[in-house]
Structures are given as structure tokens and as C-alpha cells.
Amino acid sequence: MKRNNLIKGFLYLGVVSLSIGCTNLDEEILDGVANNNTAGATIDVAGTLQSAIEGLRDFNGQGGVYAMDEMSTDAMVGPTRGGDWDDAGVWRQIHTHTWAPDHPEVRNAWNSLLSNAFKCNLVIENGGTAIQVAQARFLRAWYYYNVVDLFGQAPYRAAGSALTVDPQVWTRTEATDFVISELEAVLNTLPNRVTNQAFVINKDAARFLLAKAYLNKAVFKSTTAAGPYTFDAADMTKVVQNIDAITNTLAPSYWDNFKPTNNTSPEVIFSSVNNQGLDGGGMQSKWRMGAHYNQTPDGWNGFTTVAEYYNRFNAADTRAKFSTPAIITSFGNPVGFQVGQQFAPGGVTPLKDRNNNALFFTPALTLITSGVTLETAGIRGIKYIPDTGNLNVPDNDLVLMRYSDAILMKAEAIARGGSGSGAAAIMSSLALRVGVIPAASTLDGIYAERGRELWWEGWRRNDAIRFGRFLDVRSLKPYVSDAKYLLYPIPAEALFNANLKQNPGY
């Protein structure tokens, strides 16, 4: 493929070439890519679409979009441990809301989302089949949803525009409308979800994302990022209708969604597929980013949760801690949140840290740790059951959408005025599965339950903003944050596009 001025084309600007109406696939685009093989260009449509699908793995790992969604909240923190995990303070800045436009993880997220949207446009504008185009439009809506959520404004390049012209920029309202219209346009073209193949783009995934868009529409279309947010009853009813149309069910066990063979869970609506030993190496971060160097699997001794978050779980709640004989035999400790003395495989031999102190994870935590608890401060989280067949390149698929999230969205939409029923039954079904008393189907009860059900799955920031909790005082952030932190800054390198304006306050 021929690309001119690549950096200005999409790497830093996040330029994406698209027809705003997205209906005229014969129109030539001039963003470094020629349509219909003109000028000798050749587009590998299938390969480009596959690359855009593999871009979903960027929601994995420990940085980028994932850190911005989780570490900016009460759920996760990345403390500095002596010479480990300082990285010029980038992780502490996310948790304490002190980031700036030059933050590397902000830049990485911007570039990832928009370069993947760019790939979707190559498929849409260069002769993809009807199903390929529908899949690309869904993916583009997913990537743009996240741009809208994180950054507010979204750059795009209309079909036919020259690279010498700066990309245009949608407002948050315009980009939200675009995401909703795209999903509604392609929904019926997408296939039904196939059992054990949630990694195939499907109707239920589009319904889920539509429900997310309608649920957050009041936030995304607010005059200011800080609100107030007015949740329209008609939008909330759209949430209910989309969720009711989803064909998934809850899995018998919560942890069916996170085991190496989680593709078999009936609860997973959409995922990024991995194959043991072949791809998806980033999934190892799901156990390594918090695990200590001397544990099995060994880890990087980095990210933790805080005691106030952990303490919101009932002691009987199997979402917080899960064990089987096989897990103890292989790893020595339950999965979920790990606190207290840690053991070698078999669960009998106590482990020590690198300084020969007991490997005893403590709830007490500071942003910069030192002394005896240098390596052990903080409650660790292992959300996915490690794949004993290959710890480095495991078989666990990355879950992007789950039915439990969907029905919690329904309960919330009903609480916000949407037409529908069954909110209390939803809360009961989730509680019954994990052995606890149901939370109330009030907004406060639903927010608390979302924190327990969806811990470390990438939705906490989105939830906290919608419920008006994101800026609050919390552990290791003893102040109310400035409202500017409800949006991330536009990366400094992107601002050579004259149509992009820095978000307020930065």
C-alpha cells in the first residue's frame, strides 16, 4: 500500500480516513491509500481487517487504555518499590490524577485507538465484502467509543481529502452520534453469536456496545465533562431493549469466564481470541503484573488494589477469591485477590521475598514503598486463571464484553427511568452465583455491585464518571480532583493538527 507522510497520516494525529455517511464505498479516499487499486496500490483487505481485530489486544497488558481505565480509579494503583516501578512516576500520576499532555500512556492509547480505526477504514473504503465492511464498521465504532470516552473529541478525515489538509474533528456529541448510527446500521448484517466463538464479531456484541453508548450518552453529550448529566428515559429504554435482545446467559461459575478455556463460557459476548503457545502473549500480564518474583507463576511485582476496595467484598464472595485443588497444586495460592502469606505450589511451603522476609502481602500501602514491606505492600489481583499449559502465551481469551455487565447495565437503566422490569432479579442472580446477599437495585447498590463483579476488567473509570464518583477523595488520593481530569488531554504531539484543541484545563 502506498502511504504518503505517514506520521501526519495517522501515527500521532490519529488520522482516520472515512466517508462520514459510510455508505459510498466507491468514493476515492486520499489519505495515503488509493481506492480500487488506483495508482498501483494494493490493499490486503482480509489481512488489514485481521490486523484491526488483533488491535483489540491493545486493551490487554498493563498500560495504555487499560491503565487509564483502571488505575485512574479506586480499583488499582501502581506503587513505586525502591528502584522498581517508578518510570518517572507515570503510574502514580494516573492514580493520583496528576497526568499531563506528555504522559506516555495517554499517547500510547491515543495512537492505538486511532491507528486501529484507520485500519478499519482501509477495509471499508477499499472493496471489502459486505460482511467485512460490517465487521470493520463495528470495530471502528468500538475504537471511537473509547476515543469519545477517554478524550472527548475525535479526529477524522473525510473521504477525498488530501493529506496536506488537517483532519477534521468531531465534537463529543458528533462522535457519540456517529458511534450509535454505525452500530445501528450494521447490526442486522452481523452474524448471530456462535457458541464458543465470541471472538467473532456478532449481533450481541453490537447490542452490548449500543447499550453502553446509550447508557453513557448523558455523559458524552453533556455541555461540560463535569455535568450535570441528564439521563433521558428514552435512552435508558434503548439500553433495556438492546440488553433484552442479547442471547447470552450467565455462566454457572463466575470463574468460567477467566479460565484458559473461557471461550466455552456462555456469558462471554465478545472477546479477543488467543491460542496457547501461538499468540496472545500479552495475556500473561493478567497474572504477572501483580504477582511477586518468587511466586508461581512468577511476576513483575507491580500493580495492586487498595484495602478500601478489597473490603467491599463479603468474605464469602467467590469473585474475590477462588480456589480448586488443581489451582493450589499448580500455584500454591487461590486466584482473585491475594493477601497474607503466599505459598509455593502445593500450598504448604511458605514463600519469602528477595530479602528473605516472609512473602506476606499486606493491605497497608503507600505510593512509594520502602523497608520490610518494600516488596510485599499491597493486595495483588489475578483476574484470569493462569494457563498451566503455557504461562507465557496462554489460551485464555481476553474478555471485552460479558453478559453480567449487560444485565447490570439493564438494572441501572431501569433505575434511571427506563422502561423495563427485573432489576431486583438481576441483582439476585449475580449474588446467588457467588454466595452473597443480593445488593439493592438502587443506583448506589448497582454501582457497588459493578465494582465487585467487574473488578479489573477495564470499566471502572467509565462507571465512576457516570455515577459521579471519579473525582472523589479516596485511598492514596486525599483530595477532590479538578474536573479537567474527567477527560484525558490530547497528546502534545497530536496538536499540530490545527483543528484539534487541547481539552479544557491542560
Image: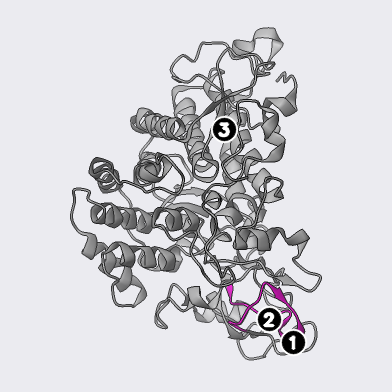
**Residue found 73% across the figure and 25% down from its top:** 6
Residue count near mark 2 (Cα–Cα under 10 Å), binned few <14, some 14–19, many ≥20? many
For the residues bearing labels 1 and 3, Cβ distance under 8 angstroms: no
Quadrant location of the C terminus in the rendered image: top right
> Which residue in the protein does label 1 denote?
372
Magenta: main secondary structure equals loop
Question: Alpha-carbon distance for marks 1 and 3?
Answer: 47 Å
| Mark 1 or 3, closer to the camera | 1
Q: Relative to residue 173, is residue 15 drawn left or right?
A: right
Residue count near mark 1 (Cα–Cα under 10 Å), binned few <14, some 14–19, many ≥20? few
> Which residue in the protein does label 2 denote?
376
In the image, what residue type sits under mark 3?
Answer: Ala
Q: Is residue 271 visible?
A: yes
Quadrant location of the N terminus in the rendered image: top right
> Residue 365 magenta-drawn?
yes
The part of the chain drawn in magenta is: 362-380
Quarter of the rendering containing residue 180: top left
Q: Secondary structure at mark 2?
A: loop
Residue 338 point in image, percent of width and height: 57, 78
Residue 446 point in image, percent of width and height: 33, 63
Q: Secondary structure at mark 3?
A: helix
